[in-house]
Image: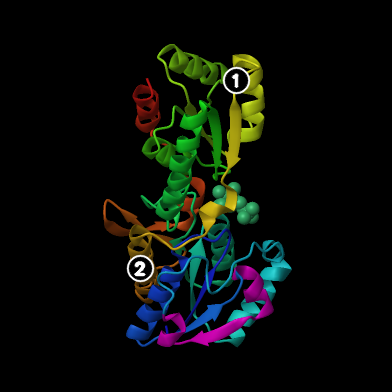
Amino acid sequence: MKRIGVFTSGGDAPGMNACIRAVVRGAVYHGVEVYGIRRGFSGMIAGDVYKMESHSVSNIVQRGGTILKSARSKEFLTPEGRKKAFEQIQAHGIEGLVAIGGNGTFTGAMIFGNEYGIPTVGAPGTIDNDLYGTDYTIGFDTAVNTALDAIDRIRDTASSHDRIFFIEVMGRDSGYIAVQSGIAGGAELVMVPEVLTPLSEVVETLKQGWSRSKSSSIIVVAEGDEAGSAVEVAAKIKVQVDENADIRVTTLGHTQRGGSPSAYDRILASRLGLGAVEGLLNGQKNVMAGIINNDLVYTPFEDTIRLPKPISEDLLRMVKILSV
Ligand code: F6P
């Protein structure tokens, strides 16, 4: 393999740049040409491709976002779109791909690989940490710390005013950010999409807290919780606890997607980027590079997409115990 392509796709995540850097430098080290594809599958279809050198990735290890930009492509979901993408890949002499992204990215890469035989190795880049085949995904640690910083700040004002705060963190289908930021931030309760939290339990937790002289409370809600957004949950709880309860809601939103990656994310991204390139050069295809128990492993795309990565029931239990 003499020429590979690299792209980022789906929601961006802090550390994607460190991963691109590792892919480019790893390829250069092994004497392989590397082409950057802008805006994921959309750029592949459009032929938005350029040759990258070692210096193309200077001074990016510390930057959030992705220098290759990212997109979610509807056209790539169609056979016509994928045909155009293949024609561009062929025209540029690209023999293998490194895809940095999440579930949607790997689904696209798997279908493309099966249709056109282009070997692809993925590196898991998503703040959601919802991919089977790796303990952690690139961007998750930074996102948790961003959420935690906000929770700490909100705790100050919640305490001053004896208020209940519902803080919404990201995670459409996944409660990982909610659980970890909630534990680290000392939340009274964490609500996640994977596990049903009856509203009666929220009410009970708040009332128990008051009976033990707690004057303020923090409840972390993952955006995909079955009870709705934090705004909706707060409105439902208000009528059940006390119409006079002083309740506020903060939605952290895309603040969690940006910012300089943590040391952990930079190191993880570097390992996974290099692991993806070396995997590709060693004949791996249609797999995702991941780190499990500190070892580099390759998991078929099919499994990363299909298999769930459950939230630890132990951690959820701990939140309840520690909030007494
Ligand atoms: O998958 C990452 C993620 O940040 C989710 O947590 C969130 O639900 C979604 O992306 C938001 O996507 P968008 O940036 O397209 O609004």
Q: Earlier in the sequence, mark 1 or mark 2?
A: 1
Q: How many marks?
A: 2
Q: Secondary structure at mark 1?
A: loop
Q: Quadrant of residue 116?
A: bottom right
Q: Residue 198: horizontal and vertical position, in percent?
A: 55, 20
Q: Secondary structure at mark 2?
A: helix
Q: Residue 29: horizontal and vertical position, in percent?
A: 33, 84
Name the quadrant of the C terminus: top left
Q: Which residue is mark 1?
A: 245
Q: Is residue 109 visible?
A: yes
Name the side, left or right, on which 310 lies relative to 91: left
**Which numbered mark, 1 or 2, is in the foreground of this view?**
1
The span picked out in magenta is: 40-58
The amino acid type of the residue labelled 2 equals Ser
Would you place residue 231 above or below residue 200 in this image?
A: below
Would you place residue 164 above or below residue 297 in this image?
A: above
Name the side, left or right, on which 91 lies relative to 270: right
Residue occupying the point 56% across, 16% down: 200
Residue occupying the point 57% across, 64% down: 9
Toward the viewer: 293 or 127?
127
Disc 1 and disc 2 in contact, CB within 8 angstroms: no
The amino acid type of the residue labelled 1 equals Ala
Q: Is residue 2 visible?
A: no
Q: Quadrant of residue 320?
A: top left
Residue occupying the point 62% across, 75% down: 44
Q: CA distance from mark 1 to mark 2?
A: 48 Å
Name the quadrant of the N terminus: bottom left
Q: Which residue is mark 2?
A: 270
Q: Residue 22: horizontal and vertical position, in percent?
A: 38, 74
Would you place residue 289 above or below residue 307 in this image?
A: below
Determine whether the beta carbon of the residue marked 1 sits less than 8 angstroms from the nearest atom of ligand 1.
no
